[in-house]
Amino acid sequence: MIYLFAALLTLFGIGFITFKQPVYSALSFTAIVLVACVLFVLSNSPFLAAATMVVYAGATIIVFLFVLMFAQRSKLQSYDVNLNRPILTCFVGGGLLGLLISGIRSMNIAPTEELASSKVADLGKLMYSDYLWTVELAGLLLLVATIAAIVIAQETKSDSMAKFEELVKTRAEGRAPNGSNS
Amino acid sequence: MSNLVWLIPVAPLLAMLVGVVLCFSSRGRESAHLPTWVGLLVAAVVCLMTLLGSEGGTTAVVTPGYTWLSVGSVTIPISARLDGVGLVQLTVVTCISFLVAVYAQGYMKGDPGYPRFFAVLSAFVFSMVMLVISSNLLVLYAFWEGVGLCSYLLIGFWYQRPSAANAAMKAFLVNRLADTAFLAGILLLWHGVGKVTTSTTAFARLDFDTIFNVLPALASEYPNLLSWVGFLLLVGAIGKSAQFPFHVWLPDAMEGPTPVSALIHAATMVTAGVYLLARMSPLLSYTPEVLQLAGWLGAITAVIGGSVALFQDDLKRVLAYSTVSQLGLLFIAFGAGMNPEMLPFAVVAAMFHLLTHAFFKALLFLTAGNVMHAMGDVIDMRKFSGLKSVLPATHILFLIGALALAGVPPLAGFWSKESIFGLLAAQIKDPQHGSLFLTWLCMGLFSSLLTATYTFRAYMRTFQGEVKTPAEAGDHPHEATPVMLAPLYMLAAGSVVSGLVIYLTGWLDKFTLPPETVEAPHGSWLLFVVSMVIVVAGYGLARVFPTFDEKKSPAFVKALANRLYLDELFYYLLVAPTQSLANLVGAIDKFVDSLIRGVAHVPTAAGFQLRRMQSGIVSSYALTMAVGIVLLVALAFL
Amino acid sequence: MLQLNEILMLSSGMFVLGLIGFLTRKNMILMFLAVELMLAAVAINFVAFGSRLGLQQGQLFAVLILTVASCEAAIGLALVVAMYKRKSTLDISQWDSLHEVEPPKLAESGEVEDDNIHDYPTLAPAGLAPNAQSTVKGGSRAANEKA
């Protein structure tokens, strides 16, 4: 089963890295996130899988695509076509992967038979009792980030960019309900 | 009276401080001479009062003054110690300095450094007075150096002129050479005194009273050490008193303003060495070999100075070499004190000639200053002559000074020279050193002949003959102002009468001789006659003495005109080796520096290579970071 | 059913893919996506460990990571938009104004030349420059001796 996942990850990963059209890359990213969601499910975390699918594969990717589309030119851009030192980077990444896998192998984790299925209710209880402050803090962080995004995007106000600004405002407003979803 | 002793150094000191303030003030610069006048006048009057009110005798009065340093058990007091010799010296210093200061007001008028001149002048007198009255050899040394510093400042007064700056440095360095020996002598003496006595503090070991008390013990236990001390002190003395071979700085010191020349040559600086020998005469009485050396050096200097003076064209330079030669006579006098029982008389004779010489040499220099003033700063005797009618007052004054210097009776120089020669002549029959004394006597008399010759020659070249003035003098060369002439009259009076009065009354003896001593040996009538013959012969020689052309003259004349090439000798013997040593050290320093700079260069060069990594592109930084993480993780696995 | 170590390996692979994507792509938005990928890989780790240990905290932490990732995306995108307004490109390599301007030569960089540092001070033989006219006596006196 791991080989299936590994093959999927490799496939979409290579696609993500090498697609010349950024939109395709973004779609590959969505696919990878979906794979991750499956991994969540396999780890007995169905709620998280759902949330990730909605937030990541749904809202976040859409916003990213918005911006991508907006900045999209009619023809391919050279910075999308050419990769930055791919061979060296692959060596580095491969080295890191090898190290991590060998490290994980050396941990000798005993295989388990059955995992206790977790309930969403337990998670919710935990979040809104023991970790209430943490959750509130995360919400506050989202609020601050929203305001910050508005301020940053408003930075310049040249006429040619007025339309762009509109879009950013829309995105920032649309961002807030996404954040509160988590 | 002794309460007033401290007034003598303090008055010039205050004058100096006021002068320094005036140097930096915009107002009152023209009256900067006033504090110096007042300070020196007070000092001179106090000196004269003390001298005239003094009973005489050689007992020293120590007046505690100021505690310079007091740390735990170590106290360094500065006390005044005044005895006969010191009193006489002090009077000469302050009186001549005062007269020179009065003269300088006229001479230096309008100079931009006017306040500076008088401030340094006061400092100079202060240092000299402290040198004379200090009760401790180390304090004496401190002010000895102070005198050297002030002379540096005064000789280099017109520091814009390369020749003046060079002369100042030369004077300072040559003195430094001798002072090193002097300091070594002091330290050696300190060591020696510490060996024979333990009763005093470390600093008080160098008090003159302590030194003189332990001298017999020191002489019997460590005679060699004492000889070395005497020798080193002598070297210090010949440096300051410009004796062969350290006389080279004195003629160049003419680069300073003329009042400075008068002050240095007549009253203060050059007499410091003689004073040191006089002060240390109890010590020197145990070391006749040092006195013999002093006598030889004096005799050589007297002859060399006189011969060189004969061939100089610069009026001030003639006088400078004359000073060198006369100081040689003083050292001969000390040589004549080789026999311990004669040493007090030698000191008397030396102080006598020092005193009269102060009068007439100051007079000569200041009149030469008048000539220079009138001739538009030209002092080369080839360029002017016949000034008798142009500068009548100066002419008379110069003539008086010249006659006194040449030793024409009854002027001062005759008597003081007689006392030295008489001392030598009285000892010719001495079984042990008789021939030595005879040699010195002959050399002294020969230098007298030279003195008479060059003095008259300088006089005739300057004031006699047809009237000729250089272009720099302008149309109407004028006589000096009254304020410049007044001190000259006083000096002239001193030059005329001081010798005769002192010689006949023996007035100086009561300050310098122990009361119970026998009658001082005086010259015989024969010596008087010989001296007069010498003066006349000198005059005759001066009349017929030819003017040498630089190119056609014989070798020895050329050598004398070039001051016996002693400057060149010094250059090749001392300056050039020092310079090559400095170059060598500089090269080594450069090498070491280059090593250090090479090491320092490594990080710099590395930095220049590494800064290429700062591409500003985020991806590169991230890649570097990733590589670093991989390496770190790999390291964790190893 | 996957074992814990297998999930860890998969998440490592995902992380490395994100890393490679971040390092190789020049498109700023895609670089952000790559970072999101790396964050998701880490979140998987938390969830897997939590599940193995029977704890809910792993999921909780993953939720927080999601939140922070959203914040980051918001601000990051805002920055990208602002930057795009400036240069009309998403190329990250255009933003290199912090780089060294040009490889400087050693000598120009404030480094003192070796010859200059050994310019030792010499004792001035003559004090200041001759200004003879300013002194009364210091003028034309015949200095007939060499110093």
Image: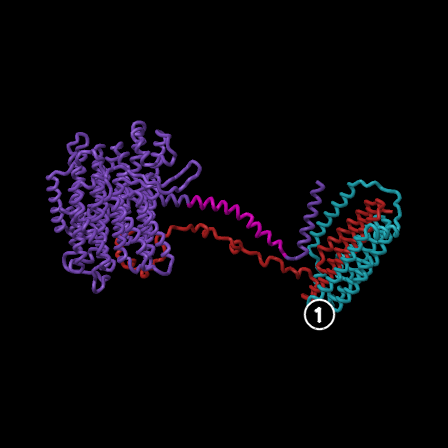
- Quarter of the image that includes the N terminus of chain B: top left
The question of residue B28 being in magenta is answered with no
Residue B234 located left or right of residue B390: right
The residue sitting at the top extreme is: B221
Report the predominant secondary structure element of the magenta stretch: helix
Name which residue lies at 81% across and 62% down.
Answer: A177
Name which residue lies at 32% across and 54% down.
Answer: B35
Of residue B587 and residue B107, the one placed in the foreground of this image is B107
- Say which colour chain A has: cyan
Question: Which picture quadrant has residue B422?
Answer: top left
Instruction: Please give the range of residues in magenta.
Output: B586-615
- Using the image, name the chain to which the residue with label 1 belongs: A
Image vertical order of residue B64 relative to residue B463, above or below:
above
Of residue B509 and residue B537, the one placed in the foreground of this image is B509
**Residue B546 in picture, x, y percent from top left:** 15, 51
SS for dot 1: helix
**Residue B473 in picture, x, y percent from top left:** 23, 61
- Say which colour chain B has: purple
Of residue B192 and residue A61, the one placed in the foreground of this image is B192
**Residue B87 in picture, x, y percent from top left:** 26, 42
The question of residue B607 being in magenta is answered with yes
The residue singled out by tag 1 in the image is A161
Is residue B558 in sight in this rendering? no
Name which residue lies at 23% across and 32% down.
Answer: B340
Which chain does red denote in the image?
C
Question: Which picture quadrant has residue A31?
Answer: bottom right
The residue sitting at the bottom extreme is: A159
Question: Which picture quadrant has residue B241?
Answer: top left
